[in-house]
Image (cartoon, rainbow, N blue to C red):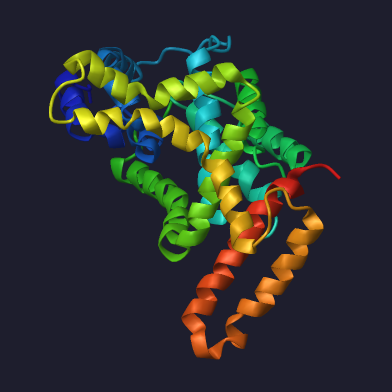
Amino acid sequence: MAKRLLVAYALWALGGPVGLHHVYLGRDSHALLWMLTLGGLGMGWLWEFWQLPGWVARANATQESHPRSPEPPALSPVRFFGQVLVGIYFGLVALIGLSSLPGFALLALPLAVGLGVHVVSSVGEQTSDLKNTLTAAFLTSPVFYGRALAILPISLTASITAQQYRCYKPRRDTGETLSARLYRLGLAYLAFTTPLAYCAFCNTAATVHYVADAIGALLDWLSFFPSLGSFLEQLLLLPYRAWRLLTDGTGIWAGSFQEWEKVYEFVKSFQTERQQLAYKVLGLPDGAPVEEIHKKYRELVKLWHPDHNRHQVEEAERRFIEVQAAYESLMQPKKAKPT
């Protein structure tokens, strides 16, 4: 059945951020990517307005028997950049939802990053070799074991491997039913969101802790690369600069948007303030040695253990959790350093 451009545009307008138009055009990998990223944070969805006619034409052409070119597809910097970003995104989601599993850093993390890279590799008429992409991710993971930024090199290695093994997809069976395709997409969506939802609703403190660690480690790493730090600053200030361009700084939202300039400074100082707070919770001066941190942690854990404070259980539980969070916040960067 021929695909109609008007229907594609209607689905793009009504459900574009969740990939309805991609489901209609048979682009299931692209639909899954949009479902998991809300249309590439909205920016990818808006950009597709100009690409829909070409996709509709290609979707109609798939019903004809044209042989695939034996040559690999051309290199695409946009696709490679997307592979790296989505690989990092999948890794962060795994870090939030699955980090308590045994062997997470060696098994679940590279698997999540490799799958994220492969989803982008399979967008459109292209694909890559899943086995080689996952192998690269699994081989890179032990090299950076214990590093807060292990996600980045794993995603880079997997993306480079996916680009090396890029190829065209074989002709899809046009007889596959829509219900079977939606069932497969639904399973993939549940596999991605279930661990994240569990952690968000049942382990909120851990969720905040892991996200804070990832943001702090990223900002520490960016301090060695001023150009990337500048790019992050410009990205954070983009809404403010767009508003200034459109309204010249006037209007009822002037005060709110001017506060946006403070966002970058807040994020930049986040890691330092978190460590200072951790030292304060443990009652230690800034920069205290590891031996003193261990000693003070053992003392406070015994002091505020709920079993030893039956008369003030709620207060003891709150202090006990604060002490544990402060200790982990100070020790995690030290664990990442080579011995």
Quarter of the N terminus within the rendering: top left
Q: What residue lies at 58% left-to-right and 72% top-to-bottom? A: 320
Quarter of the C terminus within the rendering: top right
Question: Is 233 displayed left or right of 177 in the figure?
Answer: right
Q: What residue lies at 71% left-to-right and 53% top-to-bottom? A: 331
Query: Residue 202 placed where, x, y %?
Result: 44, 65
Task: Give 200 or 87, whichever is nearer the viewer.
Answer: 200
Query: Residue 106 placed where, x, y %?
Result: 71, 48
Query: Residue 221 placed where, x, y %?
Result: 63, 31
Query: Residue 273 placed where, x, y %?
Result: 55, 45
Question: Is 190 displayed left or right of 243 in the figure?
Answer: right
Is residue 126 among what the camera can see? no
Number of callouts: 0
Q: Is residue 294 above or below residue 245?
A: below
Residue at the front extreme?
Answer: 285
Residue at the right extreme?
Answer: 339
Q: What residue lies at 62% left-to-right and 87% top-to-bottom? A: 308
Task: Give 16 or 168, whichever is nearer the viewer.
Answer: 16
Q: Is residue 76 above or below residue 322?
A: above
The quarter of the displayed image where residue 249 is located: top left
Q: Is residue 119 above or below residue 77?
A: below
